[in-house]
Image (tube, helix red, strand yellow):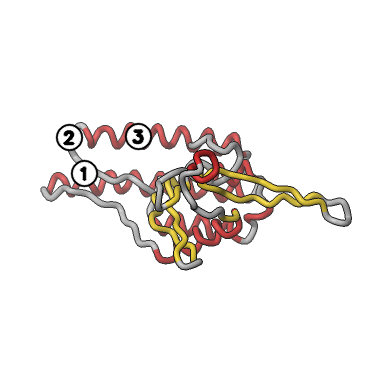
C-alpha cells in the first residue's frame, strides 16, 4: 500500500493523464460561525505544484470519489490468461478458485471493518497476510511460465464500494486510505472541456 500523502485516501495512486505525474493531497480549513472547523480536502498534480511544469487543475476529494463510483459502473475488467492447453485451462480454474476465495475473504473483512467489528490495524494485517498468500500461490504458476493478470474483479470492487458508499463520510481518512489502496493500484484522471473523467482504473 502506498504511504504517499500520509492519510489522503487517493495519495500516491491518482495520476494526471497528460503528464503522468502523481496527484498529492492538500487540505484547507475553514472555521464556521459556531466555531466548528471544516476541512476541505483536494488533490493537485505534483508537476503543477512542485515543478510548475504542468497546468493540471486540482480536484476535490469529494469529486474524485464520485468519479471512482461512476467509473466502477462502466468498467468491465476481467481476469485474463494466455494459456490454451487443457492443462493450462485446469491451472487457470484452480487459480481462479483461489482468487475467488481470496476475494471473499477481503470482502468479508471489509464489511467487518465497515461495521466496526474489525479494527483498521487488524484489517491491514489480514490484507498483508492474504497478499503474501496469493503471491506465493501465483508464483507457483509463474514457475511454469504461465501468465495471469491477478486482480480483484470489478464486480467484487463494486460490491465493496457500494457497501461503504452511504457511510463513506463517516469513516476516518486513515481508514478510507486503507480501503481505497487495498482495492486500487492506479487511477489515471484527466479534465477535458471542463469535464473530469477516468482514463484508467487498475485494481490490486
Earlier in the chain: of badge 1 and badge 2, it is 1
Earlier in the chain: of badge 2 and badge 3, it is 3
Residue 147 in sight here: yes
Mark-to-mark CA distance, 1 and 2: 10 Å
Q: Position of residue 34 (x, y in %)?
A: 88, 55
Q: Position of residue 155 (x, y in %)?
A: 41, 59
Q: Position of residue 163 (x, y in %)?
A: 56, 58
Residue at 57% across / 38% down in the picture? 5
Q: Is residue 97 left or right of residue 119?
A: left
Residue at 26% across / 52% down in the picture? 80
- The vertical placement of 134 against 113, above or below, is above
To which residue does mark 3 refer?
Answer: 135
Earlier in the chain: of badge 1 and badge 3, it is 1
To which residue does mark 1 refer?
Answer: 91
Quarter that holds the C terminus: top left
Label drawn at residue 144: 2
- The vertical placement of 137 against 56, above or below, is above
Mark-to-mark CA distance, 2 and 3: 15 Å
Residue at 39% across / 50% down in the picture? 202
Q: Mark 1–mark 2 contact, CB under 8 Å? A: yes
Indicate which label's residue lies in the foreground, 1 or 3: 3
Mark-to-mark CA distance, 1 and 3: 16 Å
Foreground pick, 203 / 143: 203
Q: Residue furthest left?
A: 85
Indicate which label's residue lies in the foreground, 1 or 2: 2
Dot 3: what SS? helix
Q: Position of residue 86 (x, y in %)?
A: 12, 49
Dot 1: what SS? helix
- Neighbours of disc 1 within 10 Å: few (<14), some (14-19), many (20+): some
Q: Residue furthest right?
A: 34
- Neighbours of disc 2 within 10 Å: few (<14), some (14-19), many (20+): few
Amino acid at each position: 500500500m502506498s504511504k504517499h500523502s500520509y492519510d489522503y485516501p487517493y495519495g500516491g495512486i491518482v495520476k494526471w493523464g497528460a503528464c503522468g505525474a502523481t496527484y498529492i493531497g492538500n487540505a484547507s480549513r475553514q472555521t464556521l460561525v459556531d466555531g466548528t472547523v471544516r476541512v476541505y480536502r483536494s488533490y493537485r498534480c505534483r508537476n503543477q505544484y512542485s515543478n510548475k511544469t504542468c497546468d493540471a487543475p486540482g480536484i476535490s476529494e469529494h469529486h474524485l470519489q464520485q468519479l471512482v463510483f461512476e467509473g466502477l459502473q462502466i468498467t468491465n475488467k476481467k481476469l485474463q490468461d494466455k494459456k490454451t492447453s487443457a492443462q493450462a485451462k485446469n491451472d487457470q480454474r484452480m487459480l481462479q478458485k483461489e482468487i475467488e476465495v481470496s476475494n471473499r475473504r477481503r470482502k468479508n473483512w471489509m464489511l467487518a471493518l465497515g461495521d466496526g467489528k474489525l479494527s483498521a490495524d487488524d484489517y491491514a494485517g489480514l490484507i498483508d497476510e492474504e497478499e503474501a498468500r496469493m503471491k506465493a500461490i501465483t508464483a507457483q504458476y509463474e514457475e511454469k511460465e504461465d501468465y495471469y493478470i491477478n486482480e480483484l474483479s470489478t464486480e467484487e470492487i463494486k460490491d465493496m464500494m457500494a457497501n461503504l458508499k452511504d457511510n463513506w463520510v463517516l469513516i476516518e481518512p486513515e481508514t478510507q486510505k486503507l480501503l481505497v489502496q487495498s482495492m486500487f493500484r492506479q487511477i489515471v484522471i484527466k479534465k477535458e472541456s471542463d469535464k473530469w473523467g477516468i482514463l484508467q482504473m487498475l485494481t490490486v
